[in-house]
């Protein structure tokens, strides 16, 4: 079966607001106030918890790498408690997923978000059942850009890795597709910004473009 695997953060959903709020819980707990701004720092938010902590601590003196490790579990706990206050699916995302399923494609998710958090978020957003597979950062011994992360998402969706592609928004997604030897479609509307330099097989600016692009790339 032909299969389309989606990244989650910055591709299907803008999760940056809740991620930044969780990081700011850590900073406030240290008496530092809110070191991250939801608008200015959205792109860093989608690179993960440690990236946010490192950015915030770079704005104050005297914070070392050990503090990032101490704060990371606190960030995850804060995020789990308040995971969907600001998160929204991108316009047209779920309509595009439904159209792919109706056209006979298997559809799944491969994300570097911890699996349990991804499951919780998708369930609360009411969209988990639309995806036949979900592979998180800790589901396997490897994570993106290791190609096995993509391949396992395809297999669990009931698809053929040789007839698959990846929809994402970052260099990590592009590297994953290259390592897997499959095409990638990158969205250019997320916080990550310009993706043209990553030279994916296709770029879309609206989910209305997805079905035609997928059909062109994998039939």
Image: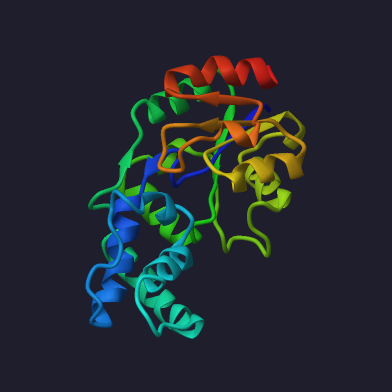
Determine whether, in the image, residue 33 is placed left or right of residue 114: left
- The image shows residue 45, relative to residue 81, as above or below, that is above
Identify the residue at image location x=63%, y=53%: 144
Identify the residue at image location x=37%, y=68%: 56
Query: Residue 81, how many percent across, how many down?
Result: 28, 66
Determine whether, in the image, residue 32 is placed left or right of residue 96: left
- The image shows residue 21, relative to residue 192, as above or below, that is below
- The image shows residue 209, relative to residue 93, as above or below, that is above
Which is nearer the eye, 173 or 34?
34
Identify the residue at image location x=42%, y=76%: 73
Determine whether, in the image, residue 139 is placed left or right of residue 73: right
Task: Report if residue 142 is visible in the image.
Answer: yes
- The image shows residue 139, relative to residue 94, as above or below, that is below
Quarter assignment of residue 33: bottom left
Q: Quadrant of the N terminus?
A: top right
Which is nearer the eye, 21 or 95?
21
Q: How many discs mark residues in the rendered view?
A: 0
Identify the residue at image location x=75%, y=45%: 179
Which is nearer the eye, 46 or 158?
46
Quarter assignment of residue 72: bottom left
């Amino acid at each position: 079966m032909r299969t389309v695997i989606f990244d989650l953060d910055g591709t299907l959903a803008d999760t940056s607001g809740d991620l930044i709020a969780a990081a700011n819980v850590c900073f406030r707990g240290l008496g530092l106030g809110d070191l991250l701004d939801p608008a200015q720092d959205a792109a860093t938010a989608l690179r993960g918890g440690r990236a946010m902590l490192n950015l915030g601590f770079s704005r104050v003196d005297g914070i070392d790498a050990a503090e990032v490790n101490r704060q990371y579990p606190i960030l995850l706990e804060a995020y789990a408690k308040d995971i969907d206050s600001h998160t929204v699916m991108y316009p047209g995302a779920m309509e595009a997923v439904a159209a792919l399923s109706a056209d006979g494609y298997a559809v799944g998710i491969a994300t570097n978000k911890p699996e349990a958090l991804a499951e919780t978020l998708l369930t609360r957003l009411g969209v988990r059942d639309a995806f036949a597979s979900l592979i998180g950062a800790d589901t396997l011994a490897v994570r993106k850009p290791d190609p096995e992360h993509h391949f396992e998402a395809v297999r669990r969706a009931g698809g053929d890795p040789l007839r698959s592609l990846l929809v994402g928004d970052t260099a990590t997604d592009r590297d994953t597709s290259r390592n897997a030897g499959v095409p990638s479609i990158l969205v250019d509307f997320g916080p990550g910004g310009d993706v043209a330099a990553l030279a994916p097989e296709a770029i879309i600016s609206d989910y209305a473009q997805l079905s035609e692009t997928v059909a062109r790339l994998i039939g």
